[in-house]
């Protein structure tokens, strides 16, 4: 596919301040609210992010590990899942920047990363 820059999709439980901090650094980030996806299930959130070619960021480790396994087993593709431990938004943004500045979108495809 030759995609360089990761585009992020923050699910509902990720603080919107993270979007503001990353956008200020020039990255393309949307939230579930921006996308009109509030109230959707985790499976629907991942499907939406995948359909948009966006790596999803979540705090929901258990459900998204299960979804990643399901995608792998069924041969479905996603643009990546980043599972973040609950931290202040500034720390989450800093950890995301480490990924965004060193990993390409193609490298992130079908990967699960933990921050």
Image (tube, rainbow, N blue to C red):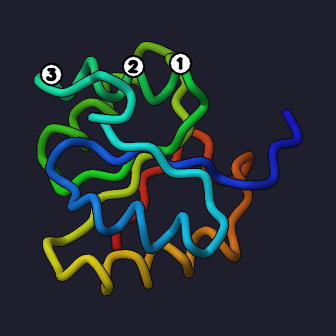
Regarding mark 1 in the picture, which secondary structure is present there? helix
Is 51 or 15 nearer to us in this picture?
A: 15
For residue 65, above or below residue 78: below
Q: Which residue is mark 2?
A: 47
Q: Point out which mark residue 41 bears.
A: 3
**Is mark 1 in CB contact (under 8 Å) with mark 2?**
yes
Regarding mark 3 in the picture, which secondary structure is present there? loop
Dividing the image into 4 quarters, which one contains the N terminus? top right
Q: How many marks?
A: 3
**Category of crowding for the residue at label 3, using alpha-carbon neighbours closer than 10 angstroms: few (below 14), some (14–19), many (at least 20):** few
Q: Is residue 71 left or right of residue 4?
A: left
**Is mark 2 in CB contact (under 8 Å) with mark 3?**
no
Residue 107 coordinates in the image, percent (x, y)? 70, 53
Is 99 or 26 nearer to us in this picture?
A: 26
User: Residue at 15% of width from left, 38% of height from top?
Assistant: 63
Is 94 or 60 nearer to us in this picture?
A: 94
Q: CA distance from mark 1 to mark 2?
A: 6 Å
User: Which residue occupies the extreme right position in the image?
Assistant: 2
Dividing the image into 4 quarters, which one contains the C terminus? bottom left
User: Residue at 60% of width from left, 52% of height from top?
Assistant: 28
**Category of crowding for the residue at label 2, using alpha-carbon neighbours closer than 10 angstroms: few (below 14), some (14–19), many (at least 20):** many
Q: Which residue is mark 1?
A: 51
């Amino acid at each position: 596919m030759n995609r360089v820059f990761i585009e992020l999709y923050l699910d509902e439980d990720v603080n919107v301040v993270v979007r503001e901090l990353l956008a200020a650094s020039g990255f393309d980030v949307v939230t579930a609210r921006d996308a009109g996806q509030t109230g959707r299930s985790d499976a629907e959130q991942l499907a939406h992010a995948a359909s948009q070619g966006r790596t999803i960021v979540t705090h929901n480790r258990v459900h998204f590990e299960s979804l990643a396994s399901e995608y792998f087993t069924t041969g479905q593709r996603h643009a990546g899942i980043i599972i973040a431990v609950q931290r202040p938004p500034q720390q989450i943004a800093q950890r995301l920047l480490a990924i965004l500045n060193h990993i390409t979108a193609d490298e992130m495809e079908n990967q699960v990363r933990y921050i």
